[in-house]
Image (tube, rainbow, N blue to C red):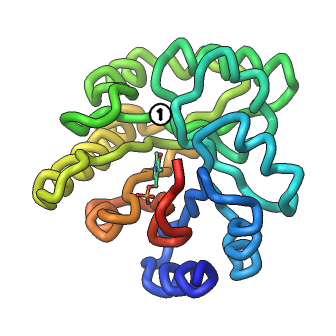
Amino acid sequence: MIAEEIKRIHSILPEGVELCAVSKFHPAAAIKEAYDAGQRIFGESRVRELLEKIPQLPSDIKWHFIGHLQTNKVRQIIGKTYIIESVDSLRLLDLIDRESERAGVVTKVLMQLHVAREETKFGFYPEELLDYFSSRGFENLRSTHICGVMGMASNTDDMERVREDFHTIADTFNRILEANPDLRGFNVVSMGMSGDWPVAVDEGANLVRIGTAIFGERQY
Ligand SMILES: *Cc1c(COP(=O)(O)O)cnc(C)c1O
């Protein structure tokens, strides 16, 4: 069933849109099933769970960290992920940069935007992120590469609302690029989950994060 769903989603995703299979709370065996169906990008939201899974699975998996990252856990995951999608404060960004330099690696990150009305409290408001780029804050980074933005829509059945949120995320991404045309490798718009990803793709996502539709309900 996992393999079928992976193949089905890949067959309908437009070209240029990547799938991050969100495997949090699901066992390594489920991830292996998706891997054997060709999936290579997986998303995890807890440091300990990620660190337990990595050695049990093939080394060519690209692990995306997508959860709120506590500053006291940064050191543990530097060098272990392909990208940290959920940078939600400048303090966290700075720490990732320092720990990456210390470890001698460059860490790729996405800046998480806060657009949903309720739900998570985490992330930058669009204007905050625009200010960060306008003031060229990224020029101080030594070992971190900001590759784009990530965000979540409001948790609602109102698809117009959801569409607006995705529109705001993509629009913020575009405004950052317009204001800083010299940015290099800033090209990822990560948005869309099981219940809303087609709308996200429609609004400009090029990376979707799908968990439940692939692996089933999570047992928390
Ligand atoms: C859990 C999670 C997802 C996947 O959600 P589903 O509804 O299971 O597809 C996507 N993005 C983030 C940030 C998540 O925490």
Quarter where residue 197 is shown:
bottom left
Q: Residue at x 69, y 34 (%)?
A: 47
Q: Which residue is drawn at 13% across and 51% down?
A: 161
The residue closer to the viewer here, 148 or 21, is 21
| Above/below status of 191 relative to 71 | below
Q: Report whether 148 appears left or right of 194.
A: right
| Above/below status of 136 relative to 175 | above
Can you name the residue that lies furthest to the front here? Answer: 219
Quarter where residue 193 is shown:
bottom left
Quarter where residue 160 is shown:
bottom left
| Above/below status of 122 relative to 201 | above
Q: Which residue is drawn at 22% across and 34% down?
A: 118
Q: Report whether 47 appears left or right of 148.
A: right
Residue 114 x %, y %: 31, 32
Residue 9 x %, y %: 48, 80
- Does residue 130 show up? yes
What amino acid is at disc 1? Met
The residue closer to the viewer here, 187 or 51, is 51
Query: Counting other residues with Cα less than 10 Å from the Cα at mark 1, is it few (<14), some (14-19), or many (20 or more)?
Result: many
Q: Report whether 156 appears left or right of 217.
A: left
- Does residue 183 show up? no
Q: What element carries label 1?
A: strand
Identify the residue position indicated by label 1 in the image: 111
Residue 98 x %, y %: 72, 15
Q: Which residue is drawn at 73% across and 72% down?
A: 35
Residue 102 x %, y %: 84, 17
